[in-house]
Amino acid sequence: MAKWNPFRKNKPEDEAPQSPDPQTEGAEQGGSESVDASAAPTPVAKPTSKPAQPPAPKKEEKTGFFGKFKQALQKTVNVLNTDLRDIVKEGRLVDDALLEEVFALMIRTDMGVSSASKIRDDIGKKFRARKVEFSDLIGSAKETVRGIMEQGSADVNFAESGPTVIMVVGVNGAGKTTSIAKLVNRYKEMGKSVVLGAGDTFRAAAVEQLTVWANRLDAEIVTGKSGSDPASVAWAATESAYKNNHDVCIIDTAGRLQTQANLMDELGRINRLINKAANKASEGSTAPHEVLLVLDATAGQNALSQAKGFSEAANCTGIILAKLDGTAKGGVAIPICQEFGLPVKFIGLGETPDAFAKFDVDTFVDALFDED
Ligand SMILES: Nc1nc2c(ncn2[C@@H]2O[C@H](COP(=O)(O)OP(=O)(O)O)[C@@H](O)[C@H]2O)c(=O)[nH]1
Ligand SMILES: [Mg+2]
C-alpha cells in the first residue's frame, strides 16, 4: 500500500498562469482537429510547500543495479535456477526427453513458445547425445536469449533541443501513473525540470494521484476538470513545457483496452495535438518524442496482446514493464522484445518512485539465469 493520501488537495489555483485557448490554437494550425475549449485545463504552478524532498541522487553501481534486477526477478529466477538444476542433477545426457523438460520449464516463465523452442533447439544443436551440467544449459540459454533480445537504446529519445515530450499509455491499472512518478524521480535526480499533464481526466482520483506525486517530487502539473478533453490537457502541458523551458514533459492518459477502437483513436488524436502544440510553440519541432506503453508483467502472456494492440494503434516507441517484482512470469520481457520491435526501456520493481531501473539486456539475462 502507498503511504501517501491520494485525496489530499494541494492546488494553489490563484497561482495558475493564463489559461490557454487550445481550440483556437489547434484550428490556427490548419487542422480539422481541435480540443474542447470549454474544458480548458488549468495549468497549476509549482506548489509553494513541498510535502517531501526528492531523494538524494544515487549511483547505479554495477552490483546494486544487478542486485535490483535479481531481487525483482527472484520468483522467475527460482523457477529457472532451482528446477533447471534439478533436471540435470549429477549431469545428464541430452536427449529428446531432457529437451522437452527444458522447454516446459522455460514456458513456465511466460517467455512464450517461440523463445522456449529456440532455447531448447540451441541446446539440442550444441549438446545432443552429450552429458551436460547445469552451467552448460544456463550458458546456452543466456546466449540464445541475448540474441533474441537484441534491442536499440534503452533510454528515452531526448529532444535535440527544447523539451522532451513523453506520452504514457496502457490499460487500466498497468502502472502508468506510478511509472510517471518514477520517471519524474529519475529526471529530477538528473537535475531536469519536469511538467506533467494529467491526461487521465476520466477519474478525479487519477488527477489527484498524479497531483500528489507532482507535489512530492517537485514537478509542475497541468490538470483539467474531471471529464474534460484529455487532448486539451496534453496540449496545455506541451505548451507549458515549451513556454517555461522545461526539460521534460510527461503526459498521463486514461487506461483503455487495446480492443476499444474509439479510445485507441483518441490516443492518436492526443498524439497529433501534442505535435501541433509543439510545432506552434517552436516551429519545426515534432512531439511526442516517446510514446511509452506500460505493461503489467504479472499479466504474463496477456501483456503480449496488449503490446500488439497498442503498438499498432498508438505509435508506441517503447515499453515500461511494470510490476516485474513479485511475478514468476518475468520471462515475458523476452517475447515483448522479440515480437514487436519495441524496446523495453524501463522496468518497474515496486511501488515507490525509486523502484525503477533502465532496462539492460545483459543485466536482465545475467540476473534471470544467475547460477548462485
Ligand atoms: N509491485 C508493484 N506495484 C506497482 C508497480 N507499478 C505500479 N504498481 C501498483 O499498481 C497499482 C496501479 O498503478 P497505477 O500507476 O495507478 O496504474 P494506472 O491505472 O496504469 O495509472 C498501484 O497500486 C501501484 O502502486 C510496480 O512496478 N511494482
Ligand atoms: Mg493512472
Image (cartoon, helix red, strand yellow):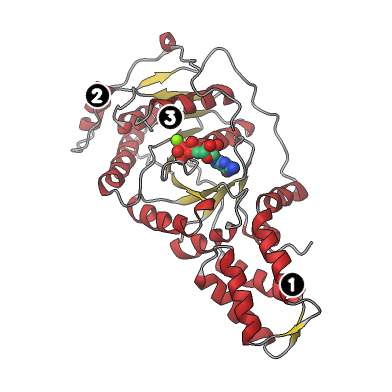
On the image, numbered disc 2 is attached to which residue? Answer: 37
Tell me the kind of residue under disc 1: Asp
Residue 193: percent from left, percent from top: 54, 28
Residue found at the very far bottom of the displayed protein: 129
Query: Are the residues at dot 1 and dot 2 in contact (C-beta closer than 8 Å)?
Result: no
Q: Tag 2, which secondary structure?
A: helix
Q: Secondary structure at mark 1?
A: helix
**Does residue 161 appear anywhere in the picture?**
no
Q: Going from the N terminus, do you reach mark 3 or mark 2 first?
A: 2
Closer-to-camera residue (61/135): 135
Q: What residue is pinned by disc 1? A: 86
Q: Which residue is depicted at the point 68% across and 75% down?
A: 140
Return the mark for residue 163.
Answer: none
Q: Earlier in the sequence, mark 1 or mark 2?
A: 2
Nearer the viewer's eye, disc 3 or disc 2?
3
Asked if residue 292 is positioned above or below residue 116 in the image, the reply reads above
- Where in the figure is residue 326, as x and y percent of width and height? 62, 49
Q: How far is the residue under mark 1 from the one under mark 3?
A: 47 Å
Q: Is ligand 2 within 8 Å of the beta carbon of the residue shown at mark 3? A: yes
The residue located at (44%, 11%) in the rendering is 15
Tell me the residue at 55%/58% (across/down): 333
Badge 3 is on which residue? 206
